[in-house]
Amino acid sequence: MESVSNTSFLKGWSISRRLSLWYSLSILLLLGAFAVITYAEFHQSMHADFDQHLKHETSLLFPLVEFESEIPAFRELADLNTTAYRTSGIYATYVRLLSSNGTVLASSPNLENTSDFNVDLPQTTQQETKSRTWDNSPLRSLYSPLIKSDGSLAGWLEVSGIEWAVHQNLNWLIRTYLVGILISTLLAFAGGYVLARRALRPVEEITRAAKNIRATDLGARLPTRFGVNDELTRLAETINDLLSRLEESIMREQRFISNATHELITPLTTLRGELDLARRRLDEGETLEALTVALTDIDRMEHIIRSLLSLSRAEKLRSAPRLDVDIGTLCHEHIDRFRDRAEERGIEITFSGEDNLLISADPVHVGTVVDNLLDNALKYTPYGGSISVEADSSGNLIRIFVRDSGHGFSEETSERMFDRFFRANESEIQQESGSGLGLAIARAITRAYEGDISGFSDGPGKGAVFKVVFPKETAP
């Protein structure tokens, strides 16, 4: 669980921070390893130097030890009355003559009025050093075996000294290393962050430019002049090539839709006029029924083509002229156009809105959004239902809500309802005529004016709510 939380914590960091973190951690590990190795070597060297001091003192004491009896003794105790053997403290040298089992046989004068320290004899008969604590001071002792002429062990000569200077230097070294490593790590993090930010500055510029590119900004491109020709420059150039190909493809699609609608609308209009004329001259029979069906199909095709033309135009509205549009007044006017149709279906339409809800847009286009939503609501609301339209403001947004008590829709439908030509598979939806382009046109118009549209429903049979938002002020 800890590793997962650490991973999720790092996911919230920027690349520059993560690079700085890994860089500083690498520096920390390298400096830590260097500190441990040098500390161990210095520690060993300091102990070796102190051991040389103890060995020197031992070499001076060996001539004073005699073996006239089974128990070793000092020949002249007065010879030990030097400063080092009489002084107590960190600069003193402590000497004891021990039996083979560790009993203290004789000791230097500076041990007379002090607390005794334990004997720690070696396990072998070889010269050996031991470290321990005595009166809260680091004590190091050199044990030298006293061998009789027959080769047996007579006792031990113990020479001890306090390693105060050694431990003081080691403690100073540890503090120096800790402070140095901490400062170096912080400097490495700060320096790495500055270098990473400078190296990744093109990424920020590319990201900022990419966020401002919309589907209608076909000519927009990413910046490529960063002063260097590196991988990021080549990446931006590759993305720009991709955008150029997408622009060309979208332009071909828009030209196709525009040309197709203009090419098809004229013969369809002519055909409709001729069929309508033929129907008026007939009174009855199968021909009349066939002509009626043909006219119905032509109406549907004409509606689809006009919807495609509207969608194509809606996707190029950024360059269209804009006026101050009062949303409340516009909604009220367009609702009046649907009242007769609503009365025929027994549906009540109500409106409530605030005053002075102004946006900068084309009233015809915004009216198309309201018409498409009202048309949808009337289609899919059963007899005796209700539709309410509300307009208000929230912060810097103007909002329009269209609520109905109709068939509603599922979560799966809500994910695709704004796609072109999409219609839900429910029987209540399929039995109503439609092209599946109304909501796509509404979304294209709202997004062209920096707004958006969304739909909500609690499920089939529970009604629907469509929400349209426009900014109070939009860029010309």
Image: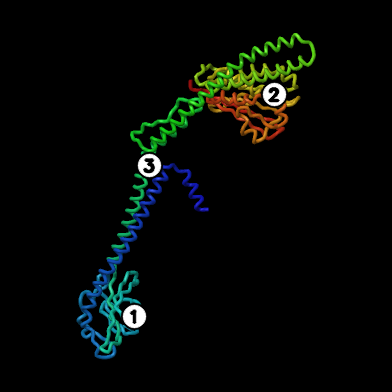
* Residue at far top of view: 281
Image-based side of 203 in relation to 76, left or right: right
Q: Which mark is residue 196?
A: 3
Residue 225 placement (x, y as % from top left): 36, 31
Let me know if residue 405 appears in the view: no
Residue 24 placement (x, y as % from top left): 37, 49
Q: Residue at x 37, y 51 (%)?
A: 26
Q: Earlier in the sequence, mark 2 or mark 3?
A: 3
Image-based side of 185 in relation to 263, left or right: left
Q: Residues within 10 Å of mark 2 (few under 14, many from 20)?
A: few
- Tell me the amino acid under the disc marked 3: Ala
Q: For residue 35, which quarter of the picture?
A: bottom left
- Tell me the amino acid under the disc marked 1: Thr
- Tell me the amino acid under the disc marked 2: Ser
Helix, strand or loop for disc 1: loop
Q: Residues within 10 Å of mark 3 (few under 14, many from 20)?
A: some
